[in-house]
Amino acid sequence: MDETRWAFVFPGQGSQKIGMGRDWAEGSAAAREVFEEADDVLGFGLTRLCWEGPEDELALTANLQPALLTTSVAILRAAAEELPTPVAVAGHSLGEYSALVAAGVLTFADALRLVRRRGELMQAAVPVGQGAMAAILGMDDAAVDALVAAAAEGDVLAVANRNAPGQLVLAGATAAVERALERARAEGGKPKLLPVSAPFHCPLMAPAREGLAPMLAATAFADPRVPVVVNVNAMPVTSGAAARNALERQIDGTVRWIESVVVLTDDLGATGILEVGPGAVLQGLVKRIRPDVRRCGLAEPSGLGALRPQPTT
């Protein structure tokens, strides 16, 4: 008997690909219904965009956020009968909305409306060209923190994502990010400018946070059925009010993914991490954070095989 204690995690931007979720929908009425509901709620062909593109239209933040949410929820519902009850759930940035749907905090329709608006607000918060994001690889995390402090020079610059040891993402004013890239190269790091349309998860997103706050306040948040480890402080929330507050703070706050995985495994007892959604980005991060933890994903229906009890020899 498989005694793995699973936590479910849900991916964010960067995990998308044309065709995502289509295999699930072809074999599951539950998954098809999720895509149909998304088209109805949003009033445009999100399903077509997910399955056929074009890629540049899918990549627009206001489209991509509901597209990833829809794909993750479709997979979750298609696989529901074969999935164990998780000990906890978490999502990376946008994926936190998928996690809240999985935990019964948000209805899918409400989550869709929120992420569509979230994407619009985040895109509009900073004029194109005035903000940037960069990944810093191959440097000690403390060294990156020091680099951020030195490179800011009065401009906005912050650690946006603490993804894995030696893999931090910076966001801020374009000039400050460029200075950080130069310093990282000089210190032996491997910096990479990211192809994103806005500097997410930094103080420049304050207008988006303020813009979404009234909509969050007007949306019903139920208490979660299982703990939800949230990005902003890597702590499990057990009330709808706390989940709402965490979503508001997350927009311009750091995604604390390293700490979130540690809490899922060390504090909440997960011995397996299941990535529910397209791609395998989070499995790769978990491998770097907790290499001894079992990992698998459900980007495709074949992923269910890894969840089934393995024969003993």
Image (cartoon, rainbow, N blue to C red):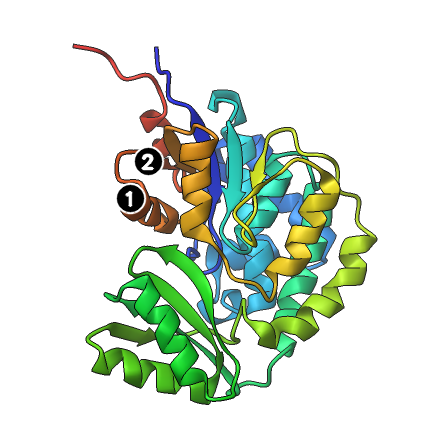
11 over 127 or under it: above or below: above
Residue 63 picture location, percent across and down = 59, 63
Type of the residue with mark 2: Arg
Residue positioned most to the right: 218
- Mark 1 and 2 residues: CB-CB less than 8 Å, in contact? yes
Of 273 and 113, nearer the camera is: 273
Of 145 and 60, nearer the camera is: 145
Q: Which residue is mark 1?
A: 287
Q: Residue at x 47, y 54 (%)?
A: 256
2 over 34 or under it: above or below: above
Q: Which residue is mark 2?
A: 295
172 over 29 or under it: above or below: below
Residue 87 appears left or right of 265: right
Residue 169 picture location, percent across and down = 40, 67
Residue 184 placement: quadrant: bottom left
134 over 274 or under it: above or below: below
Of 29 and 271, nearer the camera is: 271
Q: CA distance from mark 1 to mark 2?
A: 8 Å
Q: Residue at x 69, y 74 (%)?
A: 207
